[in-house]
Image (cartoon, helix red, strand yellow):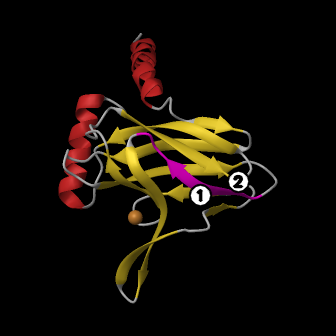
Amino acid sequence: MKFFLNGLISVFFLFPVVALHAADVKVGEIALVAPHIRAMNSNAQVTSGYLQIHNQGAEPDQLLKAHSPQATRIEIHEMRVENDVMRMRPLEQGLELPAGAIVSLAPGGYHLMIFEPTAPLIAGEIFPIELHFAKAGTMSVDFAIKAIGKGKEATQHHDHQHDHNHDH
Ligand SMILES: [Cu+2]
């Protein structure tokens, strides 16, 4: 009976989880996993977007550019340490997606740099971004706005957020 109840509870909590992660999409050979952006306070001029891009095809593809109706502009950035200094630079040629590879846009590495969002970025809401791929074409993706950040304080905020949203 206990096992049965646990099963019921799991199923019950599965639905909100599925709803929150419904933004996972696939077009052609490109699968996008967990697209999300960092929530910011209302006067922030910039934020970053993250996701995993899985090129399931036999041919390489490329993320060429990104655009949102809710931001002035979006650039594809690379972040890396050069001479002990963390540097960001735009990938003018786009982001290479080798055949079969999973390319992660994640804190400390590749990311979408979102300039001047036109509305407050509130955790739990959705931010639309169009991604333009060389072969797979253009897809509109709902990025989940999440309270994420760096360092201890940010981690605590993150956990706090989870407690309220039950999204894990
Ligand atoms: Cu950047």
Q: Quadrant of residue 12?
A: top left
The reply to whether residue 168 is visible in this rendering is: no
Task: Please state which of residues 79 and 140 is positioned toward the viewer in this rendering.
Answer: 140
Provide residue 125's location: percent of width, then percent of height.
33, 32
Q: Is residue 156 left or right of residue 14?
A: left
Q: Amino acid at mark 2?
A: Ala
How much space separates mark 1 and mark 2, taking CA atoms?
15 Å
Q: Is residue 63 magenta?
A: yes
Residue ID at (25%, 48%): 40
Task: Please state which of residues 152 and 42 is positioned toward the viewer in this rendering.
Answer: 42
Q: Which residue is mark 2?
A: 134
Provide residue 61's location: percent of width, then percent of height.
72, 56
Task: Please state which of residues 150 and 4 is positioned toward the viewer in this rendering.
Answer: 150
Relative to 46, residue 32 above or below: above
Label 1 neighbourhood size at 10 Å, few (<14), some (14-19), many (20+)?
A: some
Q: Is residue 163 left or right of residue 36?
A: left
Provide residue 141's location: percent of width, then percent of height.
52, 37
Q: Nearer the viewer, mark 1 or mark 2?
A: 2
Which quadrant is home to the N terminus? top left
The reply to whether residue 96 is visible in this rendering is: yes
- Tell me how many marks there are: 2
Q: Which residue is mark 1?
A: 103
* Residue at the farthest right position: 58
Residue ID at (31%, 42%): 118
Task: State the predominant SS element of the stretch in magenta.
Answer: strand
The magenta segment = 60-69
* Residue at the farthest bottom position: 83
Residue ID at (24%, 34%): 163
Label 2 neighbourhood size at 10 Å, few (<14), some (14-19), many (20+)?
A: some
Q: Describe the element under mark 2 as helix, strand or loop.
A: loop
